[in-house]
């Protein structure tokens, strides 16, 4: 298929990972297969020699000193998958499972993991045909790999556990059969290669990054609209201010905000003789706050793009020398740090949005009717939506505590320092959802504020955004059941609809040269 995304191991771009997360059809570049075959042959040669090599003919973790005989090697690999499939909690979302599988495919296909071609192609076929393992989302500490969740992936490949095909949840054997596939019997090293690695943590971190990017772009749009609603100034977005500081994200976001407000009738109406000298920080310091967030998002994106193209199982097979070397690439500290940065960034994106909202509902600060209702007192207007936003922001503050500073020993103290990348990354999607709701409420409030300035109109770009909202949500006159308005607004944020037609204007998280 012409629209199939061909994954080239070691060279998959962030944009391609975003496509994979969004559901693009996937396939593996067949040019990777010779390296895979060579890696499997190296493992076979190690087995034939009989010398003890971790993970190939020994036990695992604290049991690494236990030698396993050749006739038991297949059982060893099956046992490690079954014993390590010990996750709990709700299943991973389907799109994140799919991304995790793609990450594992690309990692194994680099020819450093010792898996056989048939095993790799089964994983690819599961991706192509939509066989998505049921993977409980809790149980990884982010070192020695994401063992439990990846074991649930591997278990389906050997016909154990459950998998989804579409919305149907089936026993693994039945799911594979439905797709015309057969379970595989794992060879030496293969079970360990499948369940060792950072792909669970990285998938969640990438998913969080992509969702936060959407929220970030929407927040820039709603932030500009809030400036208009409050009849604030675009002077703080003057490029000369930001050039003197030199922060790249700040310069980029200021340019976006400035362009969004360009040729606004509302801004021109109070450009001269405005008694207000300066706006509150929530309006004036948007480039500084959102720019810093953008820089952090891009830094995290760089780390995750590298990690997504890396090999993180153990031991690693080197075909040029015939060696299998034990190391620690499974330790997910880079992912943990990236996830912590993303958590702080999305927390701040929501926090400054809530402050803009709080400013708009306060007549002493905004100059607008109290709580943005034409008849305050009889009506409460935006009083409680602001409370909801405050609750969500506070929840995100609590979730933003760094995961990477925690560690707890496992495996009888063999694995004595871990990253906690897994739950550090897993929290990001909920944090992004919380922030999306906050931005959605701000969108409603900012549009309502601009309505009070009629017949004055904002810029072409911002009026287009307001029209998108008003096509589904009318101006709030008297109190009505508020929840549906919030659902619609949040959907506009979450779907990327606010960025429609503004793609060239809004910054992305793509790593910068």
Image (cartoon, rainbow, N blue to C red):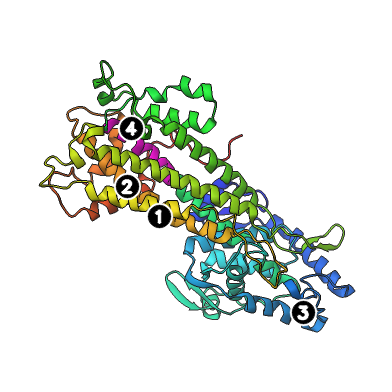
Q: Nearer the viewer, residue 490 or 100?
A: 490
Q: Residues within 10 Å of mark 4 (few under 14, many from 20)?
A: some
As drawn, 502 above or below 16? above
The residue that label 2 is drawn on is: 440
Q: CA distance from mark 1 to mark 2?
A: 17 Å
Residue range (magenta): 214-229
| Disc 3 from disc 2: Cα separation | 55 Å
Q: Residue at x 21, y 53 (%)?
A: 482
Which of label 1 and label 2 is nearer to you?
A: 1
Name the image quarter holding the N terminus. Answer: bottom right
User: Mark 2 or mark 3, which is nearer the start of the sequence?
Assistant: 3
Nearer the N terminus, badge 3 or badge 4?
3
- The numbered mark at residue 73 is 3
Report which quarter residue 349 is drawn in.
Answer: top left
Image quadrant holding the C terminus, namely top right
Q: Which residue is mark 1?
A: 395
């Amino acid at each position: 298929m012409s629209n199939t995304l061909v994954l080239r191991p070691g060279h998959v771009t962030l944009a391609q990972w975003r496509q994979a997360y969004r559901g693009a059809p996937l396939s593996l570049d067949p040019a990777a297969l010779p390296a895979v075959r060579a890696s499997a042959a190296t493992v076979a040669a190690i087995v034939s020699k009989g010398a003890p090599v971790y993970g190939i003919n020994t036990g695992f973790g604290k049991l690494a000193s236990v030698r396993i005989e050749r006739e038991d090697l297949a059982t060893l690999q099956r046992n490690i998958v079954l014993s390590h499939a010990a996750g709990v909690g709700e299943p991973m979302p389907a799109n994140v499972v799919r991304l995790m599988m793609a990450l594992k495919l690309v990692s194994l296909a680099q020819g450093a993991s010792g898996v056989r071609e048939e095993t790799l192609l089964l994983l690819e076929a599961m991706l192509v045909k939509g066989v998505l393992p049921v993977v409980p989302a809790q149980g990884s500490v982010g070192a020695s790999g994401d063992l439990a969740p990846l074991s649930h992936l591997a278990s389906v490949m050997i016909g154990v556990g459950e998998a989804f095909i579409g919305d149907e949840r089936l026993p693994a054997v039945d799911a594979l059969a439905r797709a015309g596939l057969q379970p595989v019997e794992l060879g030496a090293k293969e079970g360990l290669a499948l369940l060792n690695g950072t792909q669970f943590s990285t998938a969640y971190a990438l998913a969080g990054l992509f969702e936060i990017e959407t929220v970030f772009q929407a927040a820039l749009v709603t932030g500009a609209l809030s400036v208009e609603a409050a009849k604030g100034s675009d002077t703080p977005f003057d490029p000369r201010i930001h050039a003197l500081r030199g922060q790249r994200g700040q310069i980029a976001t200021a340019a976006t905000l400035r362009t969004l407000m360009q040729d606004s009738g509302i801004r021109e109406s109070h450009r001269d003789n405005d008694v207000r000298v300066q706006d509150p920080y929530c309006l004036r310091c948007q480039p500084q706050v959102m720019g810093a967030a953008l820089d952090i998002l891009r830094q995290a994106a760089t780390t995750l793009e590298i990690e997504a193209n890396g090999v993180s199982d153990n031991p690693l097979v080197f075909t040029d020398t015939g060696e299998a070397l034990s190391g620690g690439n499974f330790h997910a500290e880079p992912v943990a740090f990236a996830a912590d940065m993303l958590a702080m960034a999305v927390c701040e994106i929501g926090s400054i949005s809530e402050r803009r909202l709080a400013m708009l509902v306060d007549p002493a600060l905004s100059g607008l009717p109290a709580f943005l209702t034409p008849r305050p007192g009889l009506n409460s207007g935006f009083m409680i939506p602001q409370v909801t936003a405050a609750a969500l922001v506070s929840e995100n503050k609590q979730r933003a505590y760094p995961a990477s500073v925690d560690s707890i020993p496992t495996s009888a103290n063999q694995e004595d320092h871990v990253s906690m990348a897994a739950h550090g990354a897993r929290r990001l999607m909920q944090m992004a959802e919380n922030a999306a709701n906050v931005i959605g409420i701000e969108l409603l409030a900012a549009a309502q504020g601009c309505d009070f300035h009629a017949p004055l109109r904002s810029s072409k770009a911002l009026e287009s955004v307001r029209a998108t909202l008003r096509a589904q949500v009318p101006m709030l006159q008297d109190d009505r059941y508020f929840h549906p308005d919030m659902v619609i607004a949040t959907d506009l944020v979450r779907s990327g609809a606010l960025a429609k037609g503004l793609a060239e204007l809004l910054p992305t998280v793509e790593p910068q040269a």
